[in-house]
Image (tube, helix red, strand yellow):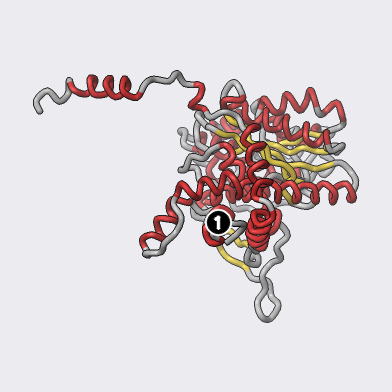
Amino acid sequence: MLYRNMPAFNLLLSGAIHFSGCMATQTIRMLKLLGLQCISVGTFFRHQRLYTIPTIVQAWQNEQAGIIRELKEMGGGLILSGDCRSDSPGHCAKYGTYSLIEDRINKVLDLQLVQSSEVPSSTWCELEGLKRSIDFLKEQNMQVSALITDRNRQVAKWVREELCPGGTSHFFDIWHIGKSLGKALDAAAKERECEDLKLWRPAIINHLYWTAASTPDGDPDVMEAKWQSMVNHVQDIHEHGTPAFPCCAHPPLEGEARDKEWLEPGTTAAIKLERVTLRTALVKDVRKLSPQHQTYSLEAFNSLILHFAPKHTGFSFLGMYSRLLMAALHFNHNSSREVARTSDGEVRYAVRYPRFCKGGWVVRPIKEKPSYAYAAALMESLSEGYSRSPETLRESSAVLSSTAPAPLSTSCQEIAKDEAVGLYLARHSQFNTGN
């Protein structure tokens, strides 16, 4: 027993389910199929609300405070990657989660969960989440040196007006721009007399990455000139006549270095490529490409969230928030994993065939297995916290509940259940007159 009449296993089972990211209904159903006596689903959610969520929030606050101390000791402005994740596809999301990762230490610095009822529509969750995160950093007296995001127009406008005047540099992640560019090239390659663009697609995407990587100072004029030179290069023209980038940087291409036919100037394919790659909007984005830091860690974190908060399940606000914090704790605890090695000390690699490569392959180093010591620490904190004072956990739960936004259903006009059932039966009776 833990503190009077709480069976230890009941509370620890709720903690184990929650801290491991499992779904309570599935786990308890599995235990009952095995014939094991266990708590009910209702008991789990009561334990979650009163005890496990406050334990997770306290652990995250301690984690966040430690990261802030570490960053202040490092000095210099923050280099942040930011992005929003919706809990469902399309424009009907219930929640939007804005995450900030500090690239120098590769750890989640802040998380903001925004419910769609708090903003005009779910598309505004990203901007609202960013504003809340920046306000939190200002309270901690922390200066943002660089912010890397996708090319969300709302976010870009707000950052340009509010953060850039204060010395923050705003860059766009290359992967997001390259993804949309690839789709445009695929569509163009399907048009008549444009089939040759399909052969040039990988080289054009690589050139986009090279444009930023070869310009470490992020000079927008140089990046624009390098990007525009690609249209000449694919037509076997290597002198560009621009002061920022007068000629191609590669040596003469001969023999095996040539694996594609040049596009003939004035052909349909060359004209179409110029229209796709030199669009005004795309050129503006190229001028803001991030030369050194990208959001790949943030994309990995968003994928990790699917384990703790899958999109096929609906969660309450605090239930969703606690699972996001669990994902952040897991990510931070394993962000600096070493590369796995064989018994002889050689690095281990794996060959993968990701879908985006469309039949191609990539080589990736294998990392060591993740650690779950943070979950064991949460179990210990839950047991000690309840044994010491369950009232303290309940008080924390009440404070968290008071700060959470009202459920979306509260904005709907209520109808009596009897009236709703009567209307339902009346509406369907006309289709069952023969029964």
Q: Tell me: residue 37, above or below residue 131.
A: below
The quarter of the image holding the C terminus is top left
Determine the residue positioned at 32% across, 22% down. 420
Residue type at tag 1: Asn
In this rendered view, identify the residue nearer to me: 342 or 270: 342
On the rendered structure, is 17 left or right of 366?
left
Residue labelled with disc 1: 5
On the rendered structure, is 296 left or right of 69?
left
Horizontal and vertical percent position of residue 313? 47, 43
Q: Is residue 357 visible?
A: yes
In this rendered view, identify the residue nearer to me: 312 or 381: 381
Determine the residue positioned at 51% across, 21% down. 411
Determine the residue positioned at 81% across, 28% down. 163
In this rendered view, identify the residue nearer to me: 198 or 138: 138
Occupied quadrant, residue 346: bottom right
Residue farthest toward the left in the current orientation of the protein: 434
Determine the residue positioned at 59% across, 20% down. 120
Q: Tell me if mark 1 has few (under 14), some (14-19) or many (20+) residues whose alpha carbon lies within 10 angstroms of its own.
A: few
Horizontal and vertical percent position of residue 108? 71, 47
Horizontal and vertical percent position of residue 317? 57, 37
Q: Secondary structure at mark 1?
A: loop
